[in-house]
Image: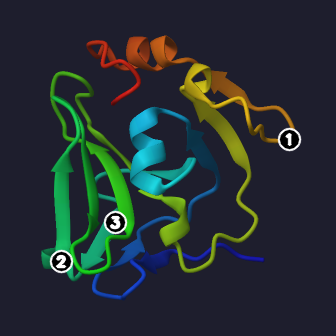
């Protein structure tokens, strides 16, 4: 099954096309991602300039910390992305696009879990992959501690 390079929100007000086909997904277990997504946040690493939006005026932004923001559809509320703008934390910035917003996620492998020390005990993914704690993630981006809330 091939992975799509298109996606959008549930109601269709926001659509996008990726410039490159994704090749993996990652999972975040932090408290904010769980609240934002309603569970485990599965995301795709996408360069900030690697996506073309349609209906961008329907995207609402919530500044979730001093250094990160989350985007969602202002009509249906679908989670769209977690983003760090270019700056002190990450000079090039970064975006994690909500994997569930893809039109077809295909068979993308899960290659990494972050904030693994914040994961509730009631679930676990099968198999092995790279796992990073909250401190590992904060150290990798030279970010101030946020207490499980990037």
Residue at screen point 19% across, 36% down = 86
Residue under circle 3? 51
Disc 3 vs disc 2: which is toward the camera? 2
Q: As displayed, is residue 145 above or below residue 89?
A: above
Give the number of the disc on residue 126: 1
Q: How far is mark 1 from mark 2, CA to CA?
A: 37 Å
Badge 1 element: loop
Q: Earlier in the sequence, mark 1 or mark 3?
A: 3
**Is 16 displayed left or right of 71 in the figure?**
right
Q: Earlier in the sequence, mark 3 or mark 2?
A: 3
- Picture coordinates of residue 137 (x, y %)? 46, 20
Within 10 Å of disc 3 (Cα), the crowding (few <14, some 14-19, many 20+) is: some
- Specify the farthest residue to the front: 122
- Picture coordinates of residue 32 (x, y %)? 39, 39
Residue at screen point 48% across, 70% down = 101
Colour scheme of the picture: rainbow
Res 80 quadrant in image: bottom left
Q: How far is mark 3 from mark 2, CA to CA?
A: 16 Å
- Picture coordinates of residue 61 (x, y %)? 17, 57
Q: As displayed, is residue 79 above or below residue 130?
A: below
- Picture coordinates of residue 40 (x, y %)? 57, 47
**Is 150 displayed left or right of 62 in the figure?**
right
Which one is in front, 76 or 71? Answer: 76
**Is 35 displayed left or right of 54 in the figure?**
right
Give the number of the disc on residue 58: 2
Q: As displayed, is residue 82 above or below residue 120?
A: below
Disc 1 vs disc 3: which is toward the camera? 1
Badge 3 element: strand
Total marks placed: 3
């Amino acid at each position: 099954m091939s992975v799509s390079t298109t996606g959008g929100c549930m109601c269709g007000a926001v659509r996008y096309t990726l410039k490159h086909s994704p090749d993996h997904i990652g999972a975040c277990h932090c408290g904010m991602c769980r609240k934002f997504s309603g569970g485990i946040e599965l995301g795709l690493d996408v360069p900030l300039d690697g996506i073309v939006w349609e209906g961008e005026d329907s995207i609402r932004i919530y500044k979730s910390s001093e250094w990160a923001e989350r985007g969602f559809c202002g009509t249906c509320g679908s989670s769209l992305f977690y983003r760090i703008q270019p700056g002190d934390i990450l000079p090039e910035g970064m975006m994690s696009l909500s994997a569930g917003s893809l039109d077809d996620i295909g068979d993308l492998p899960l290659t990494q879990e972050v904030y693994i020390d914040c994961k509730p005990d009631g679930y676990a993914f099968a198999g092995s992959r790279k796992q990073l704690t909250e401190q590992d993630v904060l150290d990798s981006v030279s970010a101030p501690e946020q207490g499980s809330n990037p």
